Amino acid sequence: MAVINQAAAKLRAQLFDSDELIVCPGVQDGLSARVCLQQGFKNLYMTGAGTAISLLGMPDLGLTTADDMVRQASMLSSLDRSVPLIADIDTGFGGPVMVARTVERYILGGVAGLHLEDQVTTKRCGHLGGKEMVDVGTFVARIRAAREARERLQSDIVIIARTDALQSMGFEEAVSRLKAAVEAGADAAFLEGVKDREEMKKFTAAMAPTPCLVNLVPGGLTPLVNAKEAKELGYRIAIWPCFAMTHAYVAYQKAARELMETGAVTAGFTEKQKGEGEGEKAPGGVRELFELCGLSECVEFDNKMGGQTFSKGV
Ligand SMILES: C[C@](O)(C(=O)O)[C@H](CC(=O)O)C(=O)O
């Protein structure tokens, strides 16, 4: 089996040959992914919202292009090919031809799973107001195009259908859209913006036996249940988009404010080994970040290949 397909097969097996909850921390760039891999997560989730923020410095308003998303998803998939990545593919970026093309590019980039939604292409974060939907036929055509791309490349990529219809069209219509998507080839279902535990339970029961995904957005519409509770509510996949990015934002602010106000950066680095608070690790210097990102492995690889790049040390 081609290496790019292994992660997809692994994700598919987790989904259909076990009943474990697939826990996916949201990552949006190399650093966030490296940290989650370091912590031992077995799966990752590429957040489109986080990608818009970190790559473009823009809100989640459908501004990332297919190229932006393909590049980021492929990079994230490449960091550890044994760890499946589920990636946001938004609306698929156009009609069926474009959706199929983008899905193929995700597959070739090594992405293991994706979620494809029914918002209009000028979409927005599912937890914002005023969302507009395409009609169900257009949504089903998107899913069918994704399935066709999967078949063309004989891939195991997991297709997760997402509907944003709950807020404007109600529960029944949202579930019926997801059922139509499953009929058209989706493997799993994602009801965006579900608002309480009762609705969560009702949703997973209504979709059974199709596996369901829950989206746990900080400050969003959905209660932030923990992994154990998500499983008890009947979910099989849980994603936490932007979960650490909100903390990173505060940390950036703090350091930037210090530099702005004092003209210096004093927050403990490793040479000082001073934590910021109880049980908190002092931030390491840039070398620690390079190590996180594979500095030693790069040096070792160069040596092993007979390269001279690091013969004077690094
Ligand atoms: C899941 C989502 O599509 C994402 O991009 O991560 C977003 C999350 C967010 O905006 O924080 C969404 O729910 O629309």
Image (cartoon, rainbow, N blue to C red):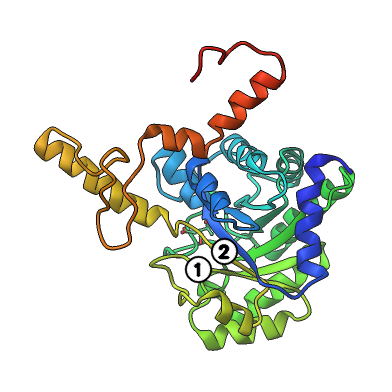
Q: Which image quarter is the N terminus in? A: top right
Q: Looking at the rendered structure, which numbered label has been put on residue 216?
A: 1
Q: Residue furthest left?
A: 262
Q: Is residue 265 above or below residue 115?
A: above
* Residue 277 appears in the figure: yes
* Dots 1, 2 in contact, CB < 8 A: yes
Query: In the image, what residue type sits under mark 1?
Result: Leu
For the point 54% across and 30% down, the residue is 295
Q: Secondary structure at mark 2?
A: strand
Q: Position of residue 194 (x, y in %)?
A: 53, 76
Q: Name the residue rendered at 76%, 65% in the picture.
A: 14
Q: CA distance from mark 1 to mark 2?
A: 6 Å
Count of residue discs:
2
Question: Which residue lies under the disc numbered 2?
Answer: 239
Instruction: Please state if 178 lies on the left or on the right of 35 as rendered.
Output: right
Left or right of 229 on screen, residue 86: right
Q: Could you tell me residue 159's position as x and y percent?
A: 74, 58
* Lower sequence index among marks 1 and 2: 1
Where residue 242 sits: x, y (%)? 45, 56
Q: Residues within 10 Å of mark 1 (few under 14, many from 20)?
A: many
User: Is residue 25 placed above or below 62 in the rendered structure?
Assistant: below
Residue 187 seen by the camera: no
At a point 27% along the width and 52% down the height, the residue shown is: 275
